[in-house]
Image (spheres, rainbow, N blue to C red):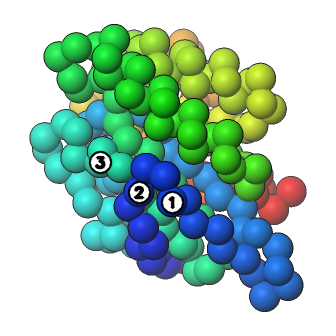
Amino acid sequence: MKARFLISTLSEFPILKDPRGNILPELALAGRSNVGKSSLINDLFGEGVAKTSATPGKTQLINFFSIDDKFLVVDLPGYGFAKAPLEEIQKWSKAIDAYINGRPNLKLILLLVDCRRELCQEDITLIEWAKAKEIPLLLILTKTDKLNRSEKDALLKKYPDAIPYTVMKPISRHLVKKRIDEILWD
Ligand SMILES: Nc1nc2c(ncn2[C@@H]2O[C@H](COP(=O)(O)OP(=O)(O)OP(=O)(O)O)[C@@H](O)[C@H]2O)c(=O)[nH]1
Ligand SMILES: [Mg+2]
């Protein structure tokens, strides 16, 4: 699998079709700023294609990637790094709203949560929205290299359906790819 960057935008969402004219399905990654969305895209689909940064707020536009011209991956802007949370939530909601309402080909959401933090309001909003729209959502707990064994066990008890992930030792890479395959091509 190889990712190709398509466009960075807040409004001009690309539509790609397969040779038979069907619109390519897509999956979107969402989560707090700095949680590791762009890193996960690189880890799954090709090093260096998505820009990462130690400074939160790196991805402020919606970035589209094509994976082998078979499906699209969408890197949504991270939320929760601004000093004015309400304003930030509104800005984020508006951008996400415009995106999700215009994407009938959105088949899967990967919601990333830093394994050391609780779910935030936007995470919960997104989970509720996905449920309402019947779009599958995978919860991915990132940066698990920061946890010790017992912390990891406790976390998995708390979120039994979540997938723990670390780009330092990507033992879950195969599992995530498998779940993506199953959901996109069911
Ligand atoms: N320790 C550790 N650090 C990670 C991991 N994944 C990402 N990081 C680091 O976390 C920081 C943020 O990663 P990004 O991938 O840029 O995060 P993002 O969610 O795309 O951030 P925004 O674009 O700001 O929303 C970078 O310094 C990464 O190197 C991980 O599994 N373990
Ligand atoms: Mg990013």
Q: Are marks 1 and 2 in contact (CB under 8 Å)?
A: yes
Whether the residue carrying mark 3 lies under 8 Å from ligand 1 is answered with yes
Q: Quadrant of the C terminus?
A: bottom right
Residue 173 seen from this side: no
Residue 56 seen from this side: yes
Closer to us: mark 1 or mark 3? Answer: 1
x 57%, y 44%: residue: 99
Q: Which mark is residue 12?
A: 1
Q: Provide the residue designation for mark 2.
A: 9
Q: Provide the residue designation for mark 3.
A: 59
x 76%, y 50%: residue: 104
Whether the residue carrying mark 1 lies under 8 Å from ligand 2 is answered with no
Q: Position of residue 64 (x, y in %)?
A: 48, 62
Count of picture labels: 3
Q: Residues within 10 Å of mark 3 (few under 14, many from 20)?
A: many
Residue furthest to the bottom: 19
Q: Are marks 3 and 2 in contact (CB under 8 Å)?
A: no
Secondary element under disc 1, as helix, strand or loop, is loop
Q: Is residue 60 above or below residue 173?
A: above
- Quick one: label 3 or label 2, which is nearer the N terminus? 2
- Quick one: label 1 or label 3, which is nearer the N terminus? 1
Task: Please state the quadrant of the image where ligand 1 appears.
Answer: top left
Give the residue type at disc 2. Thr
On the image, which quarter does residue 86 sit in?
top left
